[in-house]
Image (spheres, helix red, strand yellow):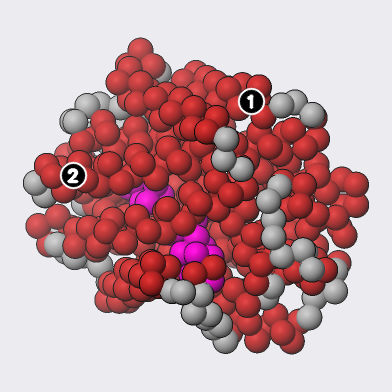
Amino acid sequence: MRSRSFRGYLSALGPGLITGAADDDPSGISTYSVVGAAFGYAPLWTALFSFPLMTAVQLMCARLGLVTGRGLAGVIRRRYPPWVLWSVCALLVLANIVNIAADLGGMAEATRLVTGVPVAISIPIEGIGILALLMYSRYRTIASTLKWLSLVLLAYVLTAFVVHVDWPLAIRATFVPHVEWSRAFFAALVAILGTTISPYLFFWQAAEEVEEERAQGRNLAKRRGATAEELNACRTDVVTGMFASNAIMYFIILATAATLHANGQTTIVSASQAADALRPLAGAGAYWLFTLGLIGTGLLAVPVLAGSCAYAITEALAWDGSLDRPPGRAGKFYAVLGSAITLGAALTYAGVNPIRLLFASAVLNGVLAPPLILIVLLLTRDRTVMGKATNPRLVDVLGWTTFGFMVAAALGLFFAA
């Protein structure tokens, strides 16, 4: 019986787990490292606090795709005027291109760390490689392989038990929120929220729920609506993916606090400094572990970033497109996807420090997320959109809490001294 239950649990995992893995992208790894080095154990409470918030938002997006049979942009196009639709798409594309640039730059910097290949050379190679894989392979096959590579991030978990962690202080910081009225702290808080509750994941989650149903041969009419069993499986998938994502977040902050911050290294401006957090566990191999983690998560995240752009724009224009279709059958979709990667790669040549760009992209996501969360909330509370499957009360409360807290954090960033 237990074996069957566990198999059922595993069979429920899909888009939510991939979304959770993609959430710990190079921007996330760098943000958590920067924050752990700068503030020590103090931000650990954000991992516990943000878990139910990000779960609620992703669950709303998943339920929206599952019940309507359409992606987020497709639902917005049918429910709101064009200016709302294109404002949302503009916010998404802006945030995603900066995020793609940051992730490609971070991957290239990590590659340079262990190979010596200049960043200017590896960026186009990695960008073209990702685009080719997406065009000529099934993304789900690629993602299932890359998820194993992202397990390298478990090195941060092991590091926390190898180094000297001040556990009483860490546990207190986990359960007792610490807030400083300073621009640096609010920048860190907005960055943490922006890299965990990111706009691109909203579009991706809804689109992938639709893709799952397309893969089962369901047309739009058959995709509409969802059974209680499907909604329960969706909840299991999303909660699992978000828990895994936040657990890694927690241990990256913990490991960098116990290694870098504890030794007076409070500012990270290079990949080698960020990699030093793994040195107590891996010694000279720290750079390799860091590089594998950054490249593995980048290979997961960049397709999600570019793919969410492509889903949003093609749905907004009522074009047909899917990552499961070859370029010959979804040319416009892949044109948008390729343009997003190309623009992101071009932005990396602006001369911005990769680590700073990774952190800045997280802050940008944190500022741009609230209006998108508001739209998701309004859509998933609307019976004309969701029928009887509107938000459960707990999800609704957590969604509004997320919106309010992220607005407050963004205001704190702008008004703090």
User: Could you tell me how many numbered marks the image carries?
Assistant: 2
Q: Nearer the viewer, mark 2 or mark 1?
A: 1
Give, as a three-letter code, the residue at label 1.
Ala
Farthest right residue in view = 283
Report the front residue among 145 and 81. Answer: 81
Mark 2 touching mark 1, by CB under 8 A?
no
- Magenta stretch contains residue 204: yes
**Residue labelled with disc 1:** 120
From the viewer's perspective, is residue 147 above or below residue 51? above
**Residue labelled with disc 2:** 85
Residue 412 located left or right of residue 162: left
Span colored in magenta: 185-206
From the viewer's perspective, is residue 226 above or below residue 341? below
The Cα–Cα distance between marks 2 and 1, rounded to whole angstroms, is 36 Å
**Few, some or many C-alpha atoms within 10 Å of disc 2 (few <14, some 14-19, many ≥20)?**
many
**Few, some or many C-alpha atoms within 10 Å of disc 1 (few <14, some 14-19, many ≥20)?**
some
- Tell me, yes or no, if residue 395 can be seen here: no
Residue 307 pos. (x, y %): 40, 35
Report the front residue among 277 and 234. Answer: 277
- Magenta stretch contains residue 249: no
Magenta residues: mostly which secondary structure? helix
Q: SS of the residue at dot 1?
A: helix
